[in-house]
């Protein structure tokens, strides 16, 4: 889920060992952001997908996301992960309401829900975030591509998205009124 | 509800007589937009309120709104009414999702719901819309003022808002996480 | 959209001629209800689909729906159409919040949105409604079948649903967290 | 927030010491449920409030809530806490959608958000849950009272609710369309 470097950047809060320990004991709070380009009527024209090596040795398309830190607001976690994944010039429009379009429950055991994460039980608050600036893939992302809603829906169906991100993308498309 | 000039601008669709006739027979579809200023974390810092003569001879603060026309998309109705009320340079960020924060049912009979409109049965899809440009009150509005969420909540409680717009404003504040 | 008998039952409000006239001039307010069976954890186990002759001479699966009448609350319109389509013993659990899972904009011109209705411009507030009683197809419905979310998603993809009801069903499935 | 006995019932997952440790390092995932009675049109007639000693030595009215455990689904956490607080015969109608009406961010530092919890940084997914059975206060609750929406709004304004539960109750009332 794209936060493999969280430990380094947040060493003050939690060591790798402590985080691994917590991951076996507690649900870990995440945020996901589906980055989109919109026209001046608010219609989604493109979704941004990050090509990334996943936790199981493959590569796949993912959306933005990562852990919420101790004493960090959800809005700030969203902004931080968007900057971490898309760069400092992405100019995201963080949503005005804290209500996510869905809550994605990632379980370490496959099949419990539609979402799977072999490392942990993560509960992700998922938002659609319009970005209006210049986006560049950062850190561990190999590429950032902008695809139309139709293309994103097709890629999700064909299983080209890492882990459970295809499910998340289609939930997002449904939420904006696109016929998934 | 701020659309007294709808007939003139949309004469091709419906005459005043036909509209009056329909208003006695059918629920009329409206949109409302609560215009807000946000900071770069999506936190609402101000709400825009229009001072306007209401239908009952008083004046009061209102939010943006008006009728959805035949063969008009909701997004387009929102954009049109924002331009009509705030001017062509308001630069609204029309929401990506068609899901409103509430559905306000205005009844001609007081007390049926929390919303009242003496002229008609109107069902309004209500959205929060961030505007980033230059806003100027248009047409029948006497003034446009930007108030903090705290001020807006107080004004709503004190009954300084026209008709049922105080209720709508507090619903909007609750939706963005403000403690109403 | 399953309300061909609205005129007869509501003759006091609007004649067939007046309704036809209004349908050429104004967006008509609708409600749709996707009837579901749930287990004791709120998980949707089945969706109810009505087999019905559509407006274009074919037959197809539809969800519950129809017009909102003058001076009728949305909750009451939902309850009335559920009783009209599923019978008086359906025991629906009308949602506590007026927020729909989507707003479906049916246009008479195909392709404007994902929803099409050759007769009119209808704007439908769409809700998911759990029913716990005994449901029987009424009036113009040929059959009522209960299908699993997986079956409903497949039927929607295969185009077995009338008009745009397949889109509506998949939006509903996405909203309840089913991987469409 | 009403989960002081979580450790005992879930000892297999996390010791008191480990939980205390995690609470200083990670946001802890919670659920809250505002229990309501509804009429057959889905209109909220009463809210259920638990009288409870809070963490700071006072007593106040609270809604249902507590921690989400490792490998526990949100629906199951909701059902478990409702049973823990209202008894095994409450017959809750767990919501069909995972979308909460709000996300309440409780910070250990007062004033960061509208929600405060001196023990921890807790992020709560908050739902409105209709209960149709027989409710009895359990464990640490001194009393359970059912109040009308009007009474609940007044109590929230007068500060009779523990911690930040007054804010949560008013957000819930706004979400169901009650004029807060």
Image: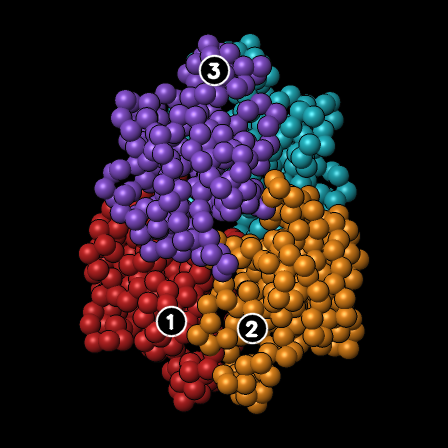
Chain colours: A red, B cyan, C purple, D orange
Residue A156 in the image, given as x and y percentages of width and height: 25, 56
Q: Nearer the viewer, residue D60 or B43?
A: D60
| B43 versus C170 height, above or below | below
Distance from disc 3 to disc 2, alpha carbons, whole Å, reads 54 Å
> Which residue position holds label 1?
A107
Q: CA distance from mark 3 to mark 1?
A: 52 Å
- Judged left or right of residue C133, residue A179 is left
**Quarter-wise, where is residue A10 in the image?**
bottom left
Q: Chain of mark 1?
A: A
State the image coordinates of residue D127 (x, y, percent, origin top left).
57, 58
Residue tagged by mark 2? D67
- x and y, in percent, of residue D90 in the image: 63, 60
Q: Are marks 3 and 1 in contact (CB under 8 Å)?
A: no
Question: Disc 3 marks which residue?
Answer: C19
- Residue A17 visible in the current orientation: yes
Q: Are marks 2 and 1 on the same chain?
A: no
Judging from the image, what secondary structure is the residue with disc 2 in?
A: strand
x 26%, y 50%: residue = A153
């Amino acid at each position: 889920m794209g936060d493999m470097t969280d430990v380094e950047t947040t060493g003050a809060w939690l060591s790798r060992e402590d985080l691994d320990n917590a991951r076996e004991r507690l649900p870990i709070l995440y945020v996901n952001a589906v980055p989109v380009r919109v026209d001046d009527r608010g219609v989604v024209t493109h979704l941004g997908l990050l090509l990334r090596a996943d936790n199981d040795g493959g590569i796949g398309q993912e959306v933005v996301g990562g852990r919420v830190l101790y004493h960090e607001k959800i809005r700030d976690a969203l902004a931080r992960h968007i900057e971490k994944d898309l760069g400092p010039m992405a100019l995201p429009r963080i949503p005005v309401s804290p209500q996510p379009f869905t809550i994605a429950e990632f379980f370490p055991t496959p099949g419990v829900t539609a979402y799977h994460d072999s490392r942990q039980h993560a509960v992700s608050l998922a938002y659609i975030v319009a970005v209006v600036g210049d986006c560049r893939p950062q850190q561990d992302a190999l590429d950032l591509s902008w695809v139309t809603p139709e293309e994103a829906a097709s890629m999700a169906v064909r299983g080209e998205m890492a882990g459970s991100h295809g499910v998340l993308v289609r939930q997002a498309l449904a939420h904006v009124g696109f016929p998934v």
